[in-house]
Image: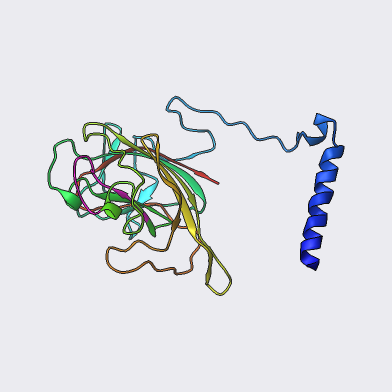
Amino acid sequence: MKSFFLLFSTFYFILSLSAQITDPVATEVWEPEPRHITFNAHNVPSDAIVLFDGTNADAWVHADGTPAKWKVENGTMTVVARTGAIFTKESFGDAQLHIEWSAPDVIVGEGQGRGNSGVFLQNKYEVQVLDSYQNRTYSNGQAGSIYKQTMPLVNAMKSPEEWQVYDIIFKAPVFNADGIKVSSATVTVIHNGVVIQNHTEIKGTTPYIGLPQNPAHGDGPIQLQDHGNPVSFRNIWIRKL
């Protein structure tokens, strides 16, 4: 009863205070002022870190630290099978990631064998890359899924002759001093302008076999997966949030 009375009193006080405000200026906030950003000719925001602009793969390395061996040609970066995944040299936490990708326009294979790659956030949490255009596979493994966890709300794939666009907004998980997860990662994925993951909870790592795990960690690199398919990428940039 006491806590209810306190809550009611607080609500009444706020309501009374609001009723006393008659000047609209009283609720205007002028400071701080959001900083202004600009955009270059490729529509990349000025506060973004460019990870691939079509000229070189200098921002990327393989797991052993050697330079990326993927093919850079005609403004794109294409997986060279069996050279291994590539990782950003820089690590990231909360971030907005823009990435464009293209499956081979000559259709080879089916299911998980067609245009398969992946975008790993903090090197642990995979947003699936797959040619899911008229290509049935398990729903939590198709393009835009949080791999083996959450299927996309819709299949927004364009045909393989067109480029696919992911805009990913990622909130990193939080671990306490004892290594216990106190807040899950979340992700919003916009595929070709359509929301396919809406503030989705990431339950942990995204293994091919087994359940999600939650090892404590800090910032980590972005990983692009070598799944043996010649998937191409272009116009990759990221903003720290």
In which quadrant of the rendered view does residue 204 lie?
Answer: bottom left
Left or right of residue 231, residue 58 in this image = right
Q: Position of residue 238 (x, y in %)?
A: 46, 43
> In the visual, does 160 lie left or right of 155?
left
Identify whether 112 is placed above or below 77: below
Residue 90 locus on image (x, y percent):
46, 52
Q: Is residue 131 magenta?
A: yes
Return the residue nearer the eye: 117 or 86: 117
Residue 176 location, quadrant = bottom right
Q: Is residue 50 magenta?
A: no
Residue 186 visible, this angle: yes
As drawn, which residue projects farthest toward the front? 1
Image position, residue 47 (x, y; %): 54, 37
- Do we see residue 91 in this rendering? no
For the residue pair 150 and 215, the one nearer the viewer reads as: 150
Prevalent SS, magenta region: loop
Q: What quarter of the picture does the N terminus occupy?
A: bottom right
Residue 68 percent location from the top left of the image: 31, 49
Left or right: residue 217 compared with residue 2: left
**Residue lying at the far top of the rendered structure:** 41
Number of callouts in the render?
0
**Image quadrant in which you'd find residue 16:** top right
Q: Nearer the viewer, residue 59 or 115?
A: 115
Residue appearing at x 27%, y 34% in the figure: 158
Which residues, given as a range, are shown in magenta? 126-138
Residue at 22% across / 40% down in the picture? 133
